[in-house]
Amino acid sequence: MHFRGSRMTKTIGYRDWRWQALLWHQVFLLWTTVDAQTRYSIPEELKQGSVVGNLAKDLSLGLSEIFERKLRVASEAGKQYFSVDAGKGELLVNDRIDREALCGQSASCVLPLQVVVENPLRSHRIEVEIKDINDNSPQFHTKELSLNIAESAAVGTRFLLESADDYDVGSNSVKTYTLTKNDCFTLKMKEVEDGKLVPELVLEKPLDREKKASYQLLLTALDGGNPVMSGTAQINVIVLDNNDNFPVFDKNIYKTSLQENVAKDTFALKIIANDADEGPNGEVEYFFSTRTPDSVLSVFELNSETGEIFLKGQLDYEKAVSYKIEVIAKDKGLPVMESHCRVQIDVIDVNDNAPEIILTSEPQPVREDAPRGSVVALLTSRDADSANNSKVTLQLPKISPFTLKPSFSNSYELVTSGALDRESVSEYKIEITATDSGSPPLSSKKTISVSITDVNDNPPVFSQSSYNVYLKENGVAGSILYSVSACDLDAGQNAKVSYSMVDSKVHEVSVSSYVYMNSENGSIYSMHSFDYEKVKVFHIQVQAKDQGSPSLSSNATVHVFILDQNDNAPAVIYPSPHAASHLRVPRTAKAGQLVTKVTAVDADSGHNAWISYKVSEATDASLFTVSVYTGEVRTKRAVSEHDDSSQRLLVEVQDDGEPVQSATVTLSILLEDGVSQPVLELRHKVSEPSKTSGTITLYLIVSLASVSVLSLVTLLVLAVKCLRSSGSDASCCMRRTHCDEDKKPNRNLHIQLNSDGPIKYVEVLGGDVMSQSHSFRSCMSPMSEYSDFTLVKPSSTTDFKEVISVLDASLPDSTWTFESQQVHSQVAVSAPP
């Protein structure tokens, strides 16, 4: 086993085992709690792995918590002397501890430690007191010392000898000195400041150089350890003649103080020694002692002639707070006489060190919903200066959701003090300013990065609350209709958005039968092509949902409008293309005589449903014409006897779409003699006197009564149907308004009566935004005012061919006109006389 001393290692042989037993006998643990701090005491030089104390027990931590909460030790000394046994919770010695290297000659040697645990983040202060062991033997700076003593020196004269140094402290330091036996000298102890003993050689008998010119003495220094350790120095005493007065200092100790920032070559102090001799024997020179260390010689310079001491290097209070220097004054006589004095130069601290900020624990990421007071990081401050210059104050920016909470000594906890929002600030650069209390004060800054982790507190937001999509009918199935997008201000899984459709109905059918939605990108695809004539508009309720826990969602509405295409040709409903009938026209017909009316409808809307009529082929193109917009077929001129009795007209019906769709109908017209004159012409002749005027009047009265009764019955039937269909809506008599916009179409029935009783105008409006809307009108021409009629309201799915067949069956000799527009359809009904 080896004991470390300055520049010397001493090996103990056969007593190693006894020393080890004694060393381990001295190992003890002292655990106390002062101001919530834990202190252990151990001797220096413990082997690596030695147990210092049970942290888990002393800090009230379970063994499982040591691993889970990542218990670790942070040393403020810069070197990691200790570690933690995670299995037992014990604090172990991690490296060799040399008390002398750590604390020098200081009476107390304490290593401050910080024990850090996480989840939650906390720190505990631990102090480990390092006890001194006697592992250093006393040492003399000079192994051989020469001492010149005049033979005339008086008995009792004392000569100061070099003292030995021992790096141990307390009882282990130097306690006494011994000197080998001789005839002329004895050894005395002189106590100086701080209780330090200095050996002095005392002359007990007069010297006689002629009898003995020199003496070899062995000076031994002994410490107070157990076992005792020692160091020796050889003293060579040379007996000199003459010069029997030595220099005398005016003070035993010279003291002064200098600020650590003074410039080089600054005067420190002056020492004065006087010699009572004359001539060279009284001339004094000054020297630093041969034992003066290099740390002093590099800082101070002594003028050997004047005794003035100047500053040669740079003072640093943090390296040395005081210098104790031994100065020798020698005369120039033979033999040389010398005296010793002590010079003490104290260094005054100047605030020349900026405070430091040390992170004990790296900042932990903080959830944005973390409560106030959550610990983020642990840190300490220190200043190498002393007194007020070392008092440090830490500050944070005023606008910051964090604050510093003092824990103990110069340790702090960085905790949250306000609300956090990752979407506003995802990472904080916290600048901490440390300022000392010196004059002028010094400061330093340290920036700590604290990242904020996301919490799912933001639902996805669509770019629009509603979307309008315009889609042409007859599109290709599987084509994309639209792509919606939603963004989420959160991050990671909390910002990952999936899309879906909220189940809804379109014509009592789930909307998923119409469209499909890609859940990843929000694209909506058609499941089949759309028919404007069946569906004009429908709504899709889409939902965006994030992947957070719990997940958040938001909705938006996509309005899909089907645009009409000219995909329906006009349909001729009168005369029926399937019925073979002939129109009879009297040969007495004049120009402009109404022959018939071609009626056609187009299932499309808008321009695609605008219908025009023209004569494509005719037996005699000069005899008949057709109205472009109404389809009325009239004579262009008066019929003559030379015209063929059988006429054929091919009427073409076209819509206004792109491309143009058309249909044709063939009219067969017979020109006959003796055909009754039209009612219109008879009405013009009513005012003329006639023998049969009484008969005609009776006929008109009977006809008017019949039509009035028929009209009243029709009105009652329609009113009953209206009341049944409107349910409890008592206000709906002849008009049915909006009853249930989402489930049933709205229908309006308008009936206008002539002043003389018969129905002149009937209009039925129907439809809703989700289906085809129709309007049917019955417009009675003067020729048909007295004729019966039948009105049929088809449903939105009823084909126009069915309408035609119903009308043909009801009024085979009537003329029907259907006009189809985008918002309603009209049916005009007239009957020939």
Image (spheres, rainbow, N blue to C red):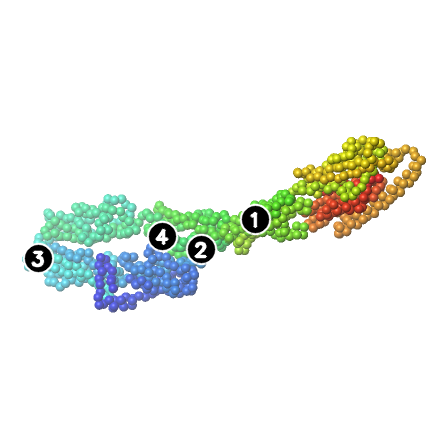
Query: Mark 3 or mark 1, which has the lower sequence index?
Result: 3
Instruction: Tell me the residue that label 2 is attached to.
Output: 375
Tell which of 625 and 131 is nearer to you: 625
Query: Mark 3 or mark 4, which has the lower sequence index?
Result: 3
| 125 relative position to 333: left or right | right
x and y percent of residue 71 in the render? 40, 60
Residue 213's tag is 3
| 75 relative position to 243: left or right | right
Q: Amino acid at mark 3?
A: Ala
What distance separates the C-alpha of mark 2 from that of mark 1? Answer: 42 Å
Q: Amino acid at mark 4?
A: Arg
Does any portion of residue 405 appear in the rendered image? no
Query: Mark 2 or mark 1, which has the lower sequence index?
Result: 2
> Which quarter of the rendered picture does the C terminus lie within?
top right
On the image, which quarter does residue 748 sit in?
top right
Q: Residue at x 53, y 53 (%)?
A: 547
Tell which of 43 and 809 is nearer to you: 809
Above or below for 739 versus 596: below
Q: Residue at x 26, y 51 (%)?
A: 346
| 354 relative position to 231: left or right | right
Tell which of 246 and 763 is nearer to you: 763
